[in-house]
Amino acid sequence: MIDAKTRDAYTVTVGIECHVQLKTKTKLFSGADNDAREAAPNTLVNHIDFGLPGALPVLNEEAVRLASKAAFALETRPQKFSKFDRKHYFYPDLPMGYQITQFDEPIIVGGQVEIIVDGQAKTIGITRAHLEADAGKSSHPDGKDYSLVDLNRAGTPLLEIVSEPDMHSAAEAKAYARELYIRMKYADVSYANLYYGNMRFDVNVSVSKTSELGTRSETKNLNSFRSVEKAVEYEVNRQIELLEKGETIVQETRGWHDAKQKTFSQRSKEEAHDYRYMPDPDIPPIVLDEAYIAAVADDMPMLPNDYRDIFRKIGLDAKVAEDILAVPETAKRVARIFDMAGAEHARRVAFWLLQPQDEEVEATDDSADSKGSDEQLVALSDMVASNKLSSTAAKEVLTELLKTGDDPAKIAESKNLLQVSDEGEIAKIVEEVLGANAKAAEDVRNGEMKAIGFLVGQVMKASKGKANPALAQQLIKKQLGL
Amino acid sequence: MTQWLPIAEIAAKVNAGELTATAMVEQALGAIADGADYQAIIATTETRARERAAIIDEQIKRGELAGRLAGVPFIAKDNFLVFGAETTAASNILRGFVAPYQSTAIERLEAEGAICVAKANLDAFAHGSSTENSDFFPTKNPHDKARVPGGSSGGSAAAVVLGMAPFALGTDTGGSIRLPASFCGAVGYKPTYGLVSRSGVVAMASSTDVIGPLTRTVDDAALVLDVMSGQDKLDGTTIVKDDAGYDGRALDLSGKKIGVIKEYMSDDLQPGVRQAIERAIDGARQAGAEIVEVSLPSLPLGLAIYYVLCPAEVSSNLSRYDGQRYGYSAPDAADLEESYTKSREVGFGAEAKRRIMIGTYVLSSGYYDAYYRKAQIVRTKLIKEFEAAFKEADFLLGPTVANTAFKLGEVSDPLQMYLTDIMTVAANLVGCPAISIPAGTSDELPVGLQLMAPSRADRDLLGCARRFEEVLA
């Protein structure tokens, strides 16, 4: 193990390449279905994906539109001219013998995202993002003398987002991965489901004691924020240990062993391919005019930063805001209620719907099928604001509301939760409570105002929570002659 | 030799019930059997052809029309994916490959009632100028069995001239339709790049590959082109066809400027070829055309550009033939690497390997800029020169090839063979349409006249060629 002092002598540099699966209906260059999640192997394959003789790739315009949206989510605009190239290598899950990608003129050039680590905001530059077709999936069953190839994924549109080497810690790498994820999700360009590999991260890590960058390793195919963080952490330690021993770092591609929480060597640069990039003559370049780009801009949904602005106006702190943001349905609802009914209601609803998120993992969108309209939530919030419902009772109504979508006032009524604001009725209960708690009543009378809370509690208990606590307190004071 | 009516007349008579599709198919199959010695055909699609003919005849009996090509038999170069026979591209690696889908061109022809009766021989993967590079057997020239038919669509050209069908389909990447048309005495049409969908045709060099007809007349070529052409959602490089379509109506040449390409009329021309071309020029002048000389200084570089770009694309396009999914797969490979190397070593012929190696070399890092990129730069220069030339002249004229058909085995040096394409590659690099029409003979062997027009001016080019046909008759 290396000590903190040794470690601090090194500057860590991290750059990340992220493959985002775009949510098109069909593949990037063929009409085959793009949703391979539940499909049996090799059922979503046509003559193009299979690389039959004479099969020609034809660009899916929807993929171009989604990539253009992603450009705005990365705070830039799509390029007016970009083109496709062939990247050659032989592998059974690459039927044509080349991958179609964008080599030197990608659809996105530049861009940036902000991350916050330990309360510090930081901007991470985007170098470029390009469209490319995914390869199929190979598997090598243990102990068998064959491998299996599933081409369902072959041709799935990917947007590969390449960051600048602007991150300097595992925490920053994780924050960046998460920020990309949330932006792609809100831009609605990807299902962004990490479980299904909709976003995969390759981390490039190097360490150096000087201003010059060290030799980097690239750990490929990480599919969770946690593994991004752990892989960076592991690589930093591994590289520093090697350097401290006087050894050198080999530029290489590494894999991540999730069970062992370790990276392992896959191939060194010496074994690297010469991909023989060549412009793909089958696919005309993508040419976008101003009108197209403007139309995409107009069509952009609200992005995470737009929501963050609203949550700030509502008065949510950053942690709560991020937790809300992690569940897009909730974030959208809070924003709508802010628009409809203002900050107070929005803030109350936000806390009602808040599900503390484990930021290690991606959001689960399980509020998506909850019932209850925005109007009903505002109505419920209004009942609290006007003292018709205690906040405890409101939560009970909320649970029922989200389950059934019934009218909140009716739920409150049927559950007998409406606060009693009838002075006469509460006065009667106060009288009983004061009688039964003479000692506490005496204390209050002697100026020990702490005891009044106890008495209010007793009134609430006697009224089965229905008494309006403010009114109860007022009546206690009155009856005690204060 | 079997005679065929003009294609439009065959279709009209079949639709009118005066001829049957079945009789047309039998006539074609008979001619194919009679001409077996020429080895123009790799396989017939007779079972499917007879079935389709029967269906068409039934249709017509019911009083329906069967399309603009009703009952017209045709032969497809064996790099077209076609139902009814294997699609081999005359290569060992695709031997046994049965197409699970058909090319767009074939689909469009079938939709108008045409019937594919056979697959024609070619240089394997269309790599060659003589059809001697077929992995199966060479095809012989209809005018002299000791001579080559030209290539790579040598089987298609020979088949049409031998009367095996009224038309055949070819592909032209550097001259592969026009050259065999010239050597065999057929009309060979190379459309504007993108005018006919390449979907379902085994790719050679994607940026210059075009599909076109080989026929006996310009009229027939225009009709076939009209049926096949136009945008296709399966090929992103296709363009819309001319609103007026394509027909063989002769264009009045009076007042038109025809540019004779200076670089093509060099001393290297075989004298008989020169005489034939000069005769055509005189004919054009008499038809009212103004003859001007046009120079395209980068033309001599055309072949050099082509033999960098074409192998680059070939090496890429042939990557898919890896022995893993279809076609030849080495049965005794110990592992994946060996399966790749053995399958490709056995499956590819010498010329395919040569082009894969050249192409791999020019695309390698460190050589890309020196070869591939430089070739693209010169290609752009050539395109500009053609644009300028077409400001001086409405059409460009020259021989299709400097000589008449050579003897089988006569050209054994690959570089010498590449030189055969020297006058045809430019149109492919530029993308403009070009046609070769018979322009007489030299020592009893056919000479081809080549005409070119600006990109998308296919309609005018066909009209111009039709007028030349009249003048030369």
Image (cartoon, rainbow, N blue to C red):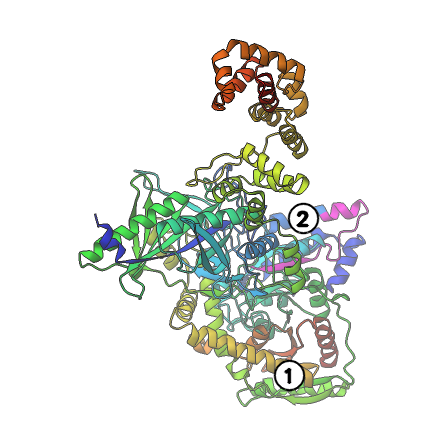
Where disc 1 sits, the SS reads: helix
Q: Residue at x 64, y 58 (%)?
A: B105
Residue B52's disc number: 2
Q: Is residue B93 above or below residue B428?
A: above
Q: Quadrant of residue A479?
A: top right
List the residue tagged with mark 1: B388
Q: Quadrant of the C terminus of chain A?
A: top right
Residue B167, given in percent of the width and then of the height, sits at 66, 63
What residue type is disc 1 on? Ala
Q: Is residue A97 above or below residue A139?
A: below
Q: Earlier in the sequence, mark 2 or mark 1?
A: 2
Q: Is residue A121 magenta?
A: no
Residue A116, given in percent of the width and then of the height, sits at 44, 50
Q: Is residue B72 visible?
A: yes
Asked if labels 1 and 2 touch by Cβ distance under 8 angstroms, the answer is no
What residue type is disc 2 on? Arg
Which region is colored magenta?
A: B56-78
Residue A126's disc number: none
Return the residue nearer the eye: A334 or B118: A334
Return the residue nearer the eye: A132 or A313: A313
Q: Is residue B68 magenta?
A: yes
Give left or right: position of B177 versus B306: right
Return the residue nearer the eye: A392 or A74: A392
Where disc 2 sits, the SS reads: helix
Residue B323, given in percent of the width and then of the height, sits at 41, 52
Q: Chain of mark 1?
A: B
Q: Is residue B407 visible?
A: no
- Density class for disc 1 (Cα within 10 Å; few <14, some 14-19, many ≥20) is some
In this rendering, the label closer to the viewer, 2 or 1: 1
Residue A39, given in percent of the width and then of the height, sits at 51, 37
Q: Quadrant of residue A334?
A: top right
Give left or right: position of A134 versus B240: left
